[in-house]
Every structure is written in C-alpha cells, then in structure tokens.
Image (cartoon, helix red, strand yellow):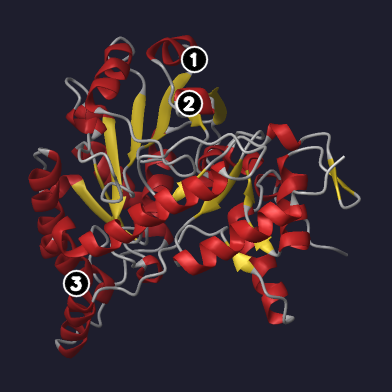
Amino acid sequence: MEPQLSNRIQSLSTSQTIAMAERAADLKAEGVDIISLSLGEPDFDTPPYIVDAAIKAIEQKFFKYPPVTGYKDTREAIVRKLKRDNGLDYTIDQIVVSNGSKQSIFNAAMVLVSPGDEVLLPAPYWVSYKEITKLVGGVPKPIKTTIENDFKITPQQLEEAITPKTKLMIFNTPSNPSGSVYSKKELDALGEVLRKHPQVYIISDEIYEYINFTGNFASFAAVEGLKDRVITINGASKAFAMTGWRVGYMAAHPIIAKACVKIQSQVTSGANSIAQKAMIAALDGGKEKIEYMIKAFDERRHLVYNLLKDIPGFKVNMPEGAFYFFPDVTEFFGKEFNGYKINNATDLSMYLLEEAKVATVTGEAFGNPECLRFSYATSKEELTEAFKRIKKALEFKK
C-alpha cells in the first residue's frame, strides 16, 4: 500500500528554479555541455574576511546550541546595519535570526496568516511566496504587472486588490525575478494606500538590497506610518555570496518577532552558530567591501541586455537590481523551431535546454507565464556563449 500523503503536501508545487537546476545538473553529469542560467546564486566565493570570522568562531569553540532568536552580538550587528543603511531604529528583541531568509518569510507568514486570509503577491513573485502562502492556509492573490511598467504595481492596482479578507502582502525589492527596484517615491505612494487598510501587514523581502544599480535603496519599513506593520527580511546569501551558510534574519514588531521565535523553537531552533558569527563580519563590513561583486554584476547586466536585444523576439527592459533578466517571450508562442512547437514559456524553456543546452526558468513559476528568467550570476564568457547558442536555436522558425 502506498503512503497516504497529506492534502497540504499534495497541494504544494516543487520549486521550478530548483527543478530546472537539478535537470541541468543531471545532464551535466551525463556529459552534456550545459550552461545554467537558472539558479539565483552568486558565482563568487564568500569573501576571505567573512571566512576568517567563521574560522575564529570555530577556534573559539562556538559548538553549542545557539539561542533560538540568534546570538546577542549577531542581533546587535543587524540593528547597526538597519540603522546605518536604512535609517531604521530597532532593538534586539525585534530581531530574529533564522536558517536563511526563506525561513524568516515562512515564520512571518505562519504567525500572521490564518486559513482563508488573502495574501497579495505582486507578480512576478519569487516562486516560494505562493507555495508558502498555500502551506500556511492563505489564499494567494497575484497582482499582475507587465514589462511595459518595469513589472511594478501601481497604487491603483494595490487599492483594487485589497479586500476585507486581505491580511498580508509579500513584497520584494530589488525583485527576483524581474530585477525591478522600487524608489522611495513609489513606496510612499503604495504606503498611502496601505495606511488606509491597517489590517494589512507587509513582508518586505530585501535580500538583494546591495545588488542595486540605482545608487539608492528604499526600505518599506521607512515609509511613514508603516514600520510596525512591516516585517523586513534580509540575510547574507546574495550580497555576500553566502548561499550555503544558511543564515538570514527579520526585523519586526516585538509581538511578531516573539511569535516567530515560538514557531522556530518548534521547527529548527537557532540558526547555525558559525554562520551567525560570520554574518557579523559581513554586516559590519557593509556594502563597501563587496563593491567588486556589484561592479561585476553591473558589467554583466549591460552585456546581457545587449545580447538579448540582439535576438529577435525578446522584449527586454533594463533591470535596476538583483542579477536577473525577465524578458517577455510571447513573440515566440505559436511558432515552431526545428520541429519543436512553442506554445508557452515552459515549452520555450525546455526547448532551449534541449536544443541550445542552456538552462532557464519559465515565467510561469513566477506568476508571469509570458516571460523567461535568465540569471546572469556567471562569467561573461559563459553568458556570451549561452546567448550565442540561444540565438542560433531560435533562427530556424516557421
């Protein structure tokens, strides 16, 4: 007799970003020359000064269970960072350190959303937002955007999406997958709407904060009158090339933070002790110490923009942050390439994997089925070769 799984797990979708990355890895293991533009992971090593801090923590024997909330000095470093970079005043009882920012998002959704509550998801959204919403019993409610508006929602769209059942909005700037960055003026305009609806909380995922080419970053919690309703999420993975260290954090109203500690205490307990100590060095070092990574991402951004513009059929905008392009690919729908019919973005993504040997992710995973996501977190040489292959694969059409 087969195991009978819960309705909860049967309703959950597998992460398509991870699924495509695993498919690409399988093909590579078979000897196929695959270039992966599917996974959002910096190709840099963790900077030496952060590694040194981890080695020091090992030498000092930080081997015991850490506090569920996070070490006091780690939370103090987060408080310093939020004050320095975002102009936000928090106390350490408002900070919770978790096993990656994804756990921070899950914790916040768990303590705020009751079954049947609506959760607003500006689309495109990161793949896990919708699935986390479903896991906690919420009702995902996407707010559709287009490339013509740089994939940003308007105050009018937000107002029209809010109902008496709306409890939460999960918001991401800079955005994965679109690379869109909301300005302070744009956040203030959304804030005017949200102040009229005090029952709506905001999870503001700011994990790509430093990978931002606008020269400015605005945090949602800095919008007038919203700080107590905003749960700011951040971490070390993207900016400091620490994806495998699994450490992130939230800053929230003390009641929300305490509730998240309650959840975390029953699920994972505290975040990795060594990673927490390493994150102190990362946060105290700030953006200045990783400017070389940001500069490299910016150079790749301009390279990929020109490469995409050179391929007929891609409608592309210039993203202002993160390390992704999210072009509209509807021009290819209904066309046939080398005997392969393209009906949607998923078909195109699979065709490019099989024909061009380039892994991408369908926009369907992000709530925008008209698009494909390309990660440019790899070398210029690989990017140039990848788009050369893509251009060739899309030349023969009917």
| Left or right of 98 on screen, residue 69 | left
Would you say the residues marked 3 and 2 are in contact, meaning their CB atoms lie under 8 Å apart?
no
Q: Which residue is mark 1?
A: 161
Residue 19 position, x and y percent, is 65, 59
Query: Is 226 rendered above or below residue 295?
Result: above
Residue 80 position, x and y percent, is 8, 52
Question: In terms of sequence position, does the residue under pointer 3 or pointer 2 come before the other?
Answer: 2
Give the spatial CA distance, label 1 vs label 3: 42 Å
Query: Is 224 rendered above or below residue 79?
Result: above
Give the spatial CA distance, label 1 vs label 2: 7 Å
Query: Is 185 rendered above or below residue 301?
Result: above
**Label 3's element?**
helix
**Label 2's element?**
strand
Identify the residue at the far right of this view: 339
The amino acid sitting under disc 3 is Lys
Question: In terms of sequence position, does the residue under pointer 1 or pointer 3 come before the other?
Answer: 1
Q: Which label belongs to residue 120? A: 2
Q: Which residue is mark 3?
A: 277
The amino acid sitting under disc 1 is Ala
Q: Residues within 10 Å of mark 3 (few under 14, many from 20)?
A: many
Tell me which residue sits at (76%, 38%) in the image.
Answer: 344
Residue 85 position, x and y percent, is 13, 45
The amino acid sitting under disc 2 is Leu
Q: Quadrant of residue 398?
A: top right
Would you say the residues marked 1 and 3 are in contact, meaning their CB atoms lie under 8 Å apart?
no
Q: Which label belongs to residue 21? A: none
Front residue of this view, candidates 267 and 343:
343
Tell me which residue sits at (36%, 62%) in the image.
Answer: 99
| Left or right of 131 on screen, residue 103 | left
Tell me which residue sits at (18%, 82%) in the image.
Answer: 52
Would you say the residues marked 1 and 2 are in contact, meaning their CB atoms lie under 8 Å apart?
yes
Tell me which residue sits at (20%, 29%) in the image.
Answer: 227
